[in-house]
Image: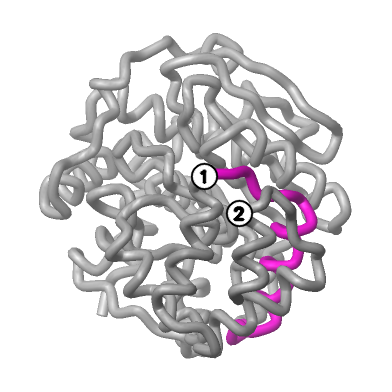
Amino acid sequence: MKKILGELIDHRSLTKETAHEVLVNLATGKFNLSQTAAFMTVYMMRSITVEELQGFRDAMLELCLPARFDQPVMDVCGTGGDGKNTINLSTLSSFVVAAAGQPVAKHGNYGVSSACGSSNVLEHFGYKFTNDVDELKRSLDRANICFMHAPLFHPAMKNVAPIRKELGVKTFFNMLGPMVNPAFPTRQLVGVFSLELARQYGYLYQNSDKDFLILHSIDGYDEVSLTSAFKFFFNEGERLAEPADLGLPLIKYEEIKGGATVEESAKLFTNVLEGKGTNAHNNAVIANAAMALYCVDRKSGMGAAVIKATEVLKSGKALEAFKKLIEK
C-alpha cells in the first residue's frame, strides 16, 4: 500500500488490474486502518479514472453475495455525496416505478454525507433487512419491489464501513454504490454527483447490456432536482434538458430540502406517499420516477412517463407498494 499511495500522491493513476487488486485487499483487511483511510482520502482530492472505477467495480461485484431474480429488475439509485440533503427522492421514486409495473431491486445504504439514506428511512418504518433471496423474491411478488441493504450483500466491506462513517464525507465507495447492485439489474436509473462521473458512468454502461439512464443536475445534485437544467446520458447518447421539458416548474433548493433527522425525513417521506406532500416534493419525485420509466420505455417519450408517474403517485398506488414492502 505504501508504494500505491506514493504513486497516487505523485498524481499517477492505477491500472484496472491494480485497482481490482487493491480493493480486494482493502475488503479482506490486508491494510491497516490508517492506510485504508489514506487511500480513501486520495479520491476526495483528485478525480477517479475510468480504469480505476472499472477495477473497483469488478472487484466489488466479484466479492458480493449475488441475488438473482427471474424477472428483469430495475434499480433506481443515486451515488449520494452531493451534500444537498434533499428528501429521499430515489427511494420515493422507486415505489412509484414499482407501482407503475416495473419490478425494482433497490440497492441502498445508510446515509454517509446526508442525515438520512434509504436504509435509514426504511429501518425507521420497521423494515427488516435481509439477504435471503427467497424473502426478497416474496417482496417482489407482494410489492413489485425489494430492498437490498448494501452491507448484507457486500460483507467484505465491513473493514471500511467504520472509516466511511467516521470520515462522514463522500468517498469513492459513493461512486461505486449504484454500479455494484448484487441483483445485476438489466435496467438502471443512476443519479451521480458530478458531470465528470456521469460521463465515466456513461462510458462504462455503454459497454454493457443494460438499459440505462444517468442523471446529473447542472447545479450539483445527483438527481433531477428541478432547481436547474439537468444532463442525462442514456443508451442513445446524451441530452441536456430543462424542468419545462418534463412539463414541470423550476423550484428552489429550500423547497426540496430533507429533514435534519431520520424522524423528520421519514415524516416528509410519508407525506409525499399519503398525498400530503408539497407541490415541489411531489414534482421532484414525479420527475425522477418519470426518468426511470422513460429509461424503461423510451419510445413513448418523457411526456408519457411524467403522466404515468403522476397518476401512480397521486392515486395512492405508490403508497400501497410501500405498505406491502414493509408489512410483516
**Three-letter amino acid code at the position of disc 2:** Ile
Q: Residue at x 71, y 46 (%)?
A: 201
Residue 230, magenta (yes or no): no
Q: Is residue 300 above or below residue 267?
A: above
Q: Residue at x 28, y 64 (%)?
A: 166
Quadrant of image for the C terminus: bottom left
Query: Percent position (x, y) of residue 221?
Result: 46, 31
Instruction: Name the one closer to the observer, 193 or 116.
Output: 193
In this rendering, the label closer to the viewer, 1 or 2 = 2
3D distance between C-alphas at marks 1 and 2: 10 Å
Q: Residue at x 48, y 27 (%)?
A: 220
User: Seen in the image, is 150 located left or right of residue 30?
Assistant: left
Q: Is residue 100 above or below residue 300?
A: below
Residue 64, magenta (yes or no): yes
**Residue 9: which numbered mark, if any?**
2
Query: Percent position (x, y) of residue 171?
Result: 47, 55
Colour mode of the rendering: one colour
Kind of element beneath mark 2: helix
Corner quadrant of residue 1:
bottom right
Query: Percent position (x, y) of residue 80?
Result: 44, 47
Q: Which residues make up the magenta segment?
A: 45-66
Name the residue that disc number 1 marks. 45
User: Seen in the image, is 289 located left or right of residue 325?
Assistant: right
Query: Could one spot residue 157 in this view of the protein?
Result: yes
Main secondary-structure element of the magenta-colored stretch? helix
Query: Could one spot residue 148 in this view of the protein?
Result: no
Instruction: Name the one closer to the observer, 17 or 83.
Output: 17
